[in-house]
Amino acid sequence: MFTGIIEEVGSISKIETSGGNIDYTIKANLARELKIDQSVAHNGVCLTVVDIKEDTYKVTAIDETLNKTNLKHLKEGHFINLERGMRMNAHLDGHIVQGHVDQTATCERAETKDGSWEYTFSYDPKLMNVTIEKGSITINGVSLTVVNSKLNEFSVAIIPYTYEHTTFKTLKKGDVVNLEFDVIGKYVKRLMELQSQ
């Protein structure tokens, strides 16, 4: 489980293909504190640490993960949002995040406001995911509040701290991001689907 509060922005130092899998070597300060088999969210995708060397560590994304997330678009040198699993005795500063990406979205607009930034995203309606005004959404692992919810499109407002300490500062129109919708909303949606059968 995660909170969507990004600990660090790491960088992709090496990408290796192994069959249908991709191994990513990440350079990050938190690498020195990790353990083999630990879960870390990468742009909101929960992956297992399989190797650690000083200030780098390695994770593997399988074909299933690559098909459902934006990880396949990453290149060496790209930046990535990182968060270790939450501690059960700590404050929940963001919202409940599972690290399981529901689908990707495309950045339609990135606008600078007076002291903040607003990003608008569109996503494929086939999976029937929804957002609500003031509801929670996770974008590339960042816990955010929806400020403008439309059918298959929504916007979020980014404060300066989030802009500076996540990959939002490099996000531009046309970029693909990972979305994890609010887990409570997903259960409500599923219950309604079952009632209508």
Image (cartoon, grey):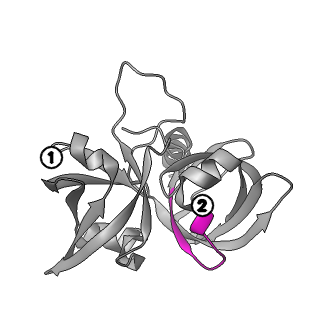
- Compared with 111, 146 (above or below) is above
Image coordinates for residue 46, horizontal then vertical, percent: 32, 52
Residue in front for this viewpoint, 7 or 128: 7
Residue in front for this viewpoint, 192 or 53: 53
Local packing at callout 1 (Cα closer than 10 Å; few below 14, some 14-19, many 20+) is: few
Residue under label 1, please give it: 37
Tell me the quadrant of the picture where the N terminus can be found.
top left
- Asked which secondary structure carries label 2, the reply is helix
Q: Is residue 40 magenta?
A: no
Residue in front for this viewpoint, 9 or 63: 9
- Asked which secondary structure carries label 1, the reply is loop
Residue 45 placement: quadrant: bottom left
Instruction: Report if residue 83 is visible in the image.
Output: yes
Local packing at callout 2 (Cα closer than 10 Å; few below 14, some 14-19, many 20+) is: some
Q: Does the magenta stretch include residue 176?
A: yes
Q: Which residue is rendered at x = 16% and y = 42% of the image? A: 35
The three-letter amino acid code for the residue at tag 2 is: Phe
- Compared with 90, 72 (above or below) is below
Residue under label 2, please give it: 168
Q: Which residue is rendered at x = 49% and y = 27% of the image? A: 92
The three-letter amino acid code for the residue at tag 1 is: Asp
Mark with earlier residue (1, 2): 1
In screen coordinates, is 131 left or right of 148? left
Residue bounds of the magenta highlight: 169-179
Q: Which residue is rendered at x = 54% and y = 54% of the image? A: 166
Q: Which of marks 1 and 2 is in front?
A: 2
Residue in front for this viewpoint, 170 or 95: 170
Q: Which residue lies furthest to the right in this view?
A: 114
